[in-house]
Amino acid sequence: MLSVTNLSITYKNTQVLNDFNLSLKHGDILALLGDSGSGKSSALRFIAGLDTVTSGSIELDGKVLSSNGDHLIPAESRGVGMVFQDYALFPHMNIEKNISFGLVAQPKVKQQARVTELLALIGLEGIEKKYPHQLSGGEQQRVALARALAPAPNLLLLDEPFSSLDKNHRDQLVLQVRSILKKAQVTSILVTHDETEADSFADVVGIIKNKRLTFKE
């Protein structure tokens, strides 16, 4: 499903990652652990196509995305969804419009059906007409997840999406989001600095240290 081979990244004349390799099957969930500045978020950005790799290759669902420093498929065409720490919901849009934001090319009836399907998946049926400020932090993050899943991405990248929540809500949401992703069978990568969170969330845990990726047994 996802194959990253001999990836090296140099950013502003500083090497961030070296000889980075990983392989994920369809539906796998990987957590990337590491200290601040270790290159975790950089790895996500380069897989997403937001930055250009220095060397190595990235292949997703049988398509080569990047190879030896060349962008072969741009970020917007990669079929990669992203969920961030700050939710990034549009405050002036209701939940239905937030979730359907990436579906504007589809007929309205299909958009509405997809929103209904996703709200059921995340356990928040019936909130279509509410606005983000009317939801709790955990509910907002589940809506952000639904919005990222709406276009049916091949890969979902999550950059510390739980870190702004208190521990009790965070622990609960970690398990809820894992369950949602498993039901949707979406291959996913979580960036976190919390080992307990990584162990609870992921099938595979990778550790970035000294610019290299190793895997926890």
Image (tube, rainbow, N blue to C red):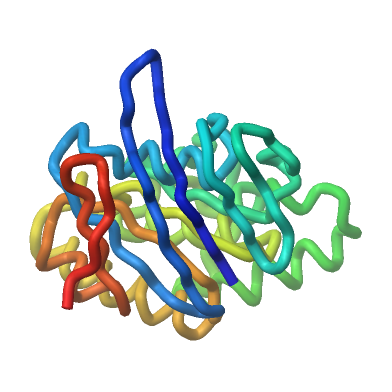
Task: Report the side of 158 relative to 66 (left or right).
Answer: left
Estimate the x, y position of residue 37 in percent, counting from the top left. Answer: 21, 32
Estimate the x, y position of residue 47 in percent, counting from the top left. Answer: 52, 47
Q: Is residue 149 visible from the viewing direction of this image?
A: yes
Question: Among all residues in the image, which is located at the extreme right?
Answer: 107
Task: Report the side of 155 relative to 87 (left or right).
Answer: right
Task: Report the side of 19 relative to 91 (left or right).
Answer: left
Query: Relative to residue 52, is residue 115 depicted above or below?
Result: below
In this rendering, the count of numbered labels is 0
Q: Which residue is drawn at 29% across and 48% down?
A: 160
Estimate the x, y position of residue 38 in percent, counting from the top left. Answer: 21, 38
Question: Among all residues in the image, which is located at the extreme bottom?
Answer: 183
The quarter of the image holding the C terminus is bottom left
Q: Quadrant of residue 108?
A: bottom right
Q: Residue at x 30, y 63 (%)?
A: 31
Query: Relative to residue 68, is residue 187 depicted above or below?
Result: below
State the residue in front, 98 or 31: 31
Q: Quadrant of residue 150?
A: bottom right
Question: Among all residues in the image, which is located at the extreme top?
Answer: 12
Query: Relative to residue 182, is residue 191 depicted above or below?
Result: above
Q: Which residue is drawn at 87% across and 50% down?
A: 105
Q: Is residue 144 visible from the viewing direction of this image?
A: no
State the residue in front, 127 or 164: 164
Q: Which residue is drawn at 50% across and 49% down?
A: 82
